[in-house]
Amino acid sequence: MDVANNLLCFLKKDDIQQIPKKDLLARIIEEVFGVPSNNINLFIDTTSCVLNFPTYIFLKKFERYLLGTLCNFEEQCKLAGKLDPKSNTKNYQKLTEELILTIDKIESLDKILYFSSLTRALLLLDMEIELFWKLKYYIMNCTIGELKFLEDLPMNYKGRLNTKISILYRYGLFQQVFIESDHDTMYEISDFGKALKSNCLNFDDEQTALKTGKTLIKYDDLSPLEMLEPMSYSDIEGV
């Protein structure tokens, strides 16, 4: 079964936003994953899907992902273009497989919506694929609470260390900044954190890249992390 090709054909066929909600999951199961129509109830009827419950959960996440990512048929065609072997997309087969594997591994519907926003950034802003995978890593490894914390902060946030900032700092989403006038170290959102906010967590906000044109969509757009290190003895002697 060629799921990559099936998904490509499915995206090119009909506007999923126009498919009745009660029919969409069955269409996905049959047309993307190749399950015969007479077996579909084994996956979508909650009274008979006990043995296939993990598969049912995956399919519901996949449905939520497609609906969250693709707002109209034009966007479907853009995603199809990324997955089409005739396009210029490198490793289109890997992209399709990674999308499906990521959806399978994501443990909550809230994270599915974050991943949908990130995919929309890939489609609408022509994000560099390597940065897309990097930002996906943050969605997978941070908790919903940590992602929500970062989402709620302003881009120019600067503050003292706390538990969540210390964790996000380890991921490279915050960086240290030395306030010379106070002889103190503060923490601000790094460019990786700003890229995650603008391309994912806050993608639909008014001040993000899609609205302002200020994009962080390539590695070259991002400044290196500012990571202050303890002074060595030679540094101290030179002061």
Image (tube, grey):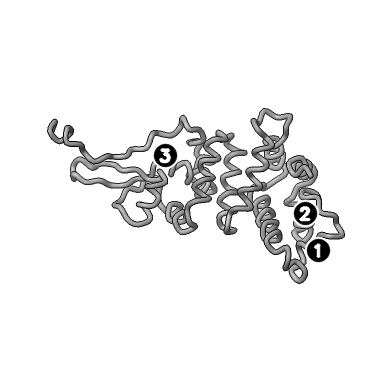
Q: Position of residue 53 (x, y in %)?
A: 70, 64
Distance Cα–Cα, label 2 vs label 3: 39 Å
Classify residue 155 as left or right of residue 5: left
Cβ–Cβ under 8 Å for marks 2 and 3: no
Is 62 located above or below residue 52 in the figure?
above
What SS does tag 1 mark?
helix
Q: Position of residue 203 (x, y in %)?
A: 53, 46
Residue 41 is tagged as 1
Distance Cα–Cα, label 2 vs label 1: 10 Å
Q: Decide which of tag 2 and tag 3 comes sooner along the chain.
A: 2
Residue type at numbered disc 3: Asp
Classify residue 219 as left or right of residue 96: left
Classify residue 219 as left or right of residue 55: left
Q: Decide which of tag 2 and tag 1 comes sooner along the chain.
A: 2
| Residue at the spot of label 3 | 191
Residue 29 is tagged as 2
Distance Cα–Cα, label 3 vs label 1: 47 Å
Quadrant of residue 108 within the rendered picture: bottom right
Image label count: 3
Q: Position of residue 160 (x, y in %)?
A: 29, 52
What SS does tag 3 mark?
helix
Residue 74 is tagged as none
Near mark 2 (Cα within 10 A), the count class, few <14, some 14-19 or many ≥20, is: many
